[in-house]
Image: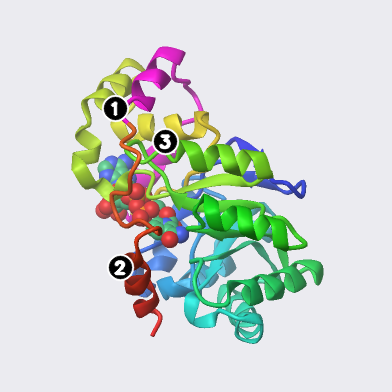
Amino acid sequence: MEYVTLNNGIKMPALGYGVYQVSSAETERCVLDAIGVGYRAIDTAQAYGNEDGVGSAIAKCGVPREDLFITTKIWISNAGYEKARLSIDESLRKLRTEYIDLLLIHQPFGDYYGTYRAMEEAYRDGYVRAIGVSNFYPDRLVDLCHFVEVTPAVDQVETHLFQQQAKAHEIMKKYGVQHESWGPFAEGRKDFFKTPALVEIGEAHGKSAAQAALRFLIQSGVVVIPKSTHRERMAQNIDVFDFALTDEEMKRLRALDEGESLFFSHYDPETVEFIIGLAK
Ligand code: NAP
């Protein structure tokens, strides 16, 4: 496993396991499988409805808590100082842990400054080791960085071969924020795993298209949290630290960036209405 060092000195695994769209019932088994094949970082969220499954796995896995790196995210319905504070307690309870390694604001909507103040407080009180954001596009990230006391450690945004977020990456670097990818496989959209460049580059290293895609992001300085409910795919996805892409291969993959979302843009007012609607 490789690690990145966040802006407060905390070490975070460069690759973790994401549990979006994993049912609450299946989450415990999936996280135990993931930990069993070597993952130490787990990415969940209040909105996924499966923090309790992650918590059961943490309690049962037999790996010391300090060897795990647990991320969760505060949902829009818990935005604002008071609600966010209570929701952090609730997440700690569900996750069955005394501290969260990385706590993110899930979406840049509602009173997220109030949310952030509650997160800064939890950080100072030792309930959280690092705080950050998700889905903050460069405009909102820059604004936040200028008006908070604790600079966000991480920004988790849609990032994959077809939406590489080059500009956002540069802004994050400028502000000392670690870029983390969600949807490193674009959830399989656009026949992702059949992309000729990924298949060919993977084959050149005796690896799969999925492994080439993850290696590309890691070598670009991006933390990845691929999701799979299949143990053998979990094992495949973490097996990306014994090879390196050449400069030519990196260049070939960089050229496939389409520079726009395959899901939804946070700059689009209809998307904003849709996401806020999910929280009502
Ligand atoms: P993803 O990791 O890009 O793709 C997951 C899909 O790829 C699943 O259909 C999975 O199928 C398939 N897959 C995984 N490994 C594979 C392999 N080696 N070969 C072939 N197919 C494979 O999608 P994601 O779950 O959206 O993103 C990853 C994580 O990012 C999430 O779980 C979540 O933690 C986080 N996320 C955050 C946000 C946010 O707003 N902050 C949004 C989305 C996601 P099987 O499961 O059937 O194997």
The x, y position of residue 149, in whole percent, is 77, 62
Q: Amino acid at mark 2?
A: Glu
Which residue has dot 3 on it?
A: 214
Mark 3 and mark 2: span between their CA atoms?
31 Å
Q: Which residues are magenta?
A: 229-256
Callouts 3 and 1 close, C-beta under 8 Å? no
Which residue has dot 2 on it?
A: 270
The x, y position of residue 237, in whole percent, is 40, 40
Viewer-nearest of discs 3 and 2: 2
Q: How many marks?
A: 3
- What SS does tag 2 mark? helix
Can the viewer see residue 73 in this picture? yes
- What SS does tag 1 mark? helix
At horizontal 51% and vertical 66% (from top left) the residue drawn is 108
Residue 250 lies in the magenta-colored region: yes
Q: Image height check: is 210 above or below 207?
A: below
Name the image quarter holding residue 173. Answer: top right
Disc number placed over residue 198 in the picture, else none: 1
Q: Quadrant of the C terminus?
A: bottom left
